[in-house]
Image (cartoon, coloured by chain):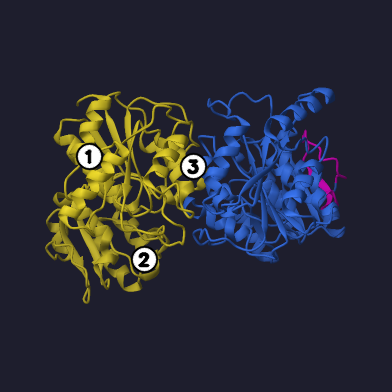
Chain colours: A blue, B yellow
Amino acid sequence: MDIANPYLLFLGDVPDALAAKTALGVVDWRREWCLGQNRLPGCQADAGLPDMTIDAAARAGARTMIVGAVNAGGRLPDHWIASIVAALEAGLDVASGLHVRLGSIPAIREAAERNGRKLFDVRHSSETFATGKGTKRPGLRILTVGTDCSVGKKYTALAMERDMRARGYSCDFKATGQTGVFISGRGVAIDAVVADFISGAVEWISPAMDPRHWDVIEGQGSLFHPSFAGVTLGLLHGAQPDAFIVCHEPTRRTMRGVETPLPSIQDVIDLTIRCGQLTNPAIRCIGLSVNTAALGDGEARAYLKDLSAKYDLPATDPVRYGMGPVIDRLARDFGDA
Amino acid sequence: MDIANPYLLFLGDVPDALAAKTALGVVDWRREWCLGQNRLPGCQADAGLPDMTIDAAARAGARTMIVGAVNAGGRLPDHWIASIVAALEAGLDVASGLHVRLGSIPAIREAAERNGRKLFDVRHSSETFATGKGTKRPGLRILTVGTDCSVGKKYTALAMERDMRARGYSCDFKATGQTGVFISGRGVAIDAVVADFISGAVEWISPAMDPRHWDVIEGQGSLFHPSFAGVTLGLLHGAQPDAFIVCHEPTRRTMRGVETPLPSIQDVIDLTIRCGQLTNPAIRCIGLSVNTAALGDGEARAYLKDLSAKYDLPATDPVRYGMGPVIDRLARDFGDA
């Protein structure tokens, strides 16, 4: 599955920015792939791109329309179907992060067939995976893990890719969630894979490669989240990371969407090493990545300094301060680029 | 999903007993539900039931034909389709443990519709699950866990149900794998659920119930198996067991199908408690269940005695000696029936 760019981002008529967060994430990290946005009357989200009609986007060279918004319930509203059909008629592929499969809607399936266009449902994998093997494969891997869901694992992995490349490392972000798939143009939404194939799918996402190349693999969930820890463990075993980064949000008091209290950072480090050693005995933590958006600059710096001293690890905010300190540790432990 | 019995077991023309192990497991535990077996010419498996034609089974009151055998590759051979259609025409439902969905084969789907019969694909869940909540729910739960796959977790759970009932406990075996589903007439093959819903599906399988009732939940995989540990962890979190039993096979040297070495029993106890405490802080191990088939009787007794002393836990072989010692420990820790 390779999603061709440049993209036209379809935002529909969603009521707020949160409903368009997939599109906003794509613009954050791949602005150069985004020609424009297409919005229906009443849309309350804005990705900060030029508004374009579908035909204008096609004339400007758009290859794929990304359905980068969700309405309540993850359904595809009937009145979005006409826009999707229009994109296919204009010669674009269409990629969606909705739960419903685009091809399950006859008008869309027929338009895709009629025009020879591709439909990508990134929440559904069309690949057939083998079960995980667990044997060590060449290449180096970083995995981002979290004290909870939604604490910056994707953002941290993308910031590592950006900042490691700036330091001359050969490295690639590897997507395991829907927004990440749009950002990298490939990957698998690992939480949508059948349970038996979680680690096998990750082995497929990050196969054997050059021994000095790094894959920076986007983590999912948390080993301490009672809804999703199975996904997290399968991802850890499949990724067999040499190094991991713990992502954290300091104001969170319970795990997202449930009543379970948050684990400590030390809990996450210890259990990740305990479980990760099964497929990579040399696994180690190389840093802490904190979303300090709720703190002032001085407060954030003091907090990160305390964390760094407490755990003897570099601690940074990827948005405010970049991943430099973590890459310094990576260079110390694994060598320069 | 409630599969009606009595059953007719369809064995096809499989080349050996291993290919019919699902059917053999059903006979081991639910002989009273099995009217007979239906075999095609050349079949090398024998479930020890009367051979019956489909029409004779229907006349004798069979309600469901179980496709309890798999050919190489898990495919449905073309020449089995006629038997399945014949069962539907004779008024039976059909339940299958094959990877292919019965309803995806037009001749089978049409015969089911024409005769108003049900098709059960136990490897595919038609239920929609919520994600796991992780909150403690009423009732008591035992989970069987393993040092590896295929070490007797299902057998141990069924033996616990049988022996606990004999001691007056209110308890039910809860299936999480395909053979278990046929044996109990309900349940979910947890390894076929979409990864995000593993723990949620287990919460559905074993919902809130009478505070003195025990569910004995069939485990899957192993926390130390690099292919399937994600399934195992989601199952552990969803089951939130009060008590668990470690199942073991003493001659195994590497995890099934991979090169990973076997963990120690202590490793399994420690990590199960470490992870299980997330949804049940009081989780404890109540015994060891060992498949000693490879040992002579004296050797087996000595081995179990050593294990019991080493771990300060009852140790038994469910086939040779029953689950009595483990139920004694259950009674000590949680009270009599």
Q: Residues within 10 Å of mark 3 (few under 14, many from 20)?
A: many
Mark 3, residue position = B197
Q: Which picture quadrant has residue B9?
A: bottom left
Residue B195 spot, x, y in % from top left:
51, 47
Is A227 left or right of A75, judged from the image as shown? Answer: left
Q: Pick whichever, B137 or A19, lies toward us.
A: B137
Segment colored magenta: A31-51
User: Would you place residue A173 above or below residue B140 in this image?
Assistant: below
Helix, strand or loop at label 1? It is helix
Mark 2, residue position = B107
Residue A311 spot, x, y in % from top left:
68, 33
User: Would you place residue A220 above or below residue B286 in this image?
Assistant: below
Mark 1, residue position = B161
User: Would you place residue A47 above or below residue B211 in this image?
Assistant: below
User: Would you place residue B120 above or below residue A312 in this image?
Assistant: below
Q: Which image quarter holds the C terminus of chain A?
A: bottom right
Residue A112 spot, x, y in % from top left:
66, 61
Mark 3: which amino acid? Phe
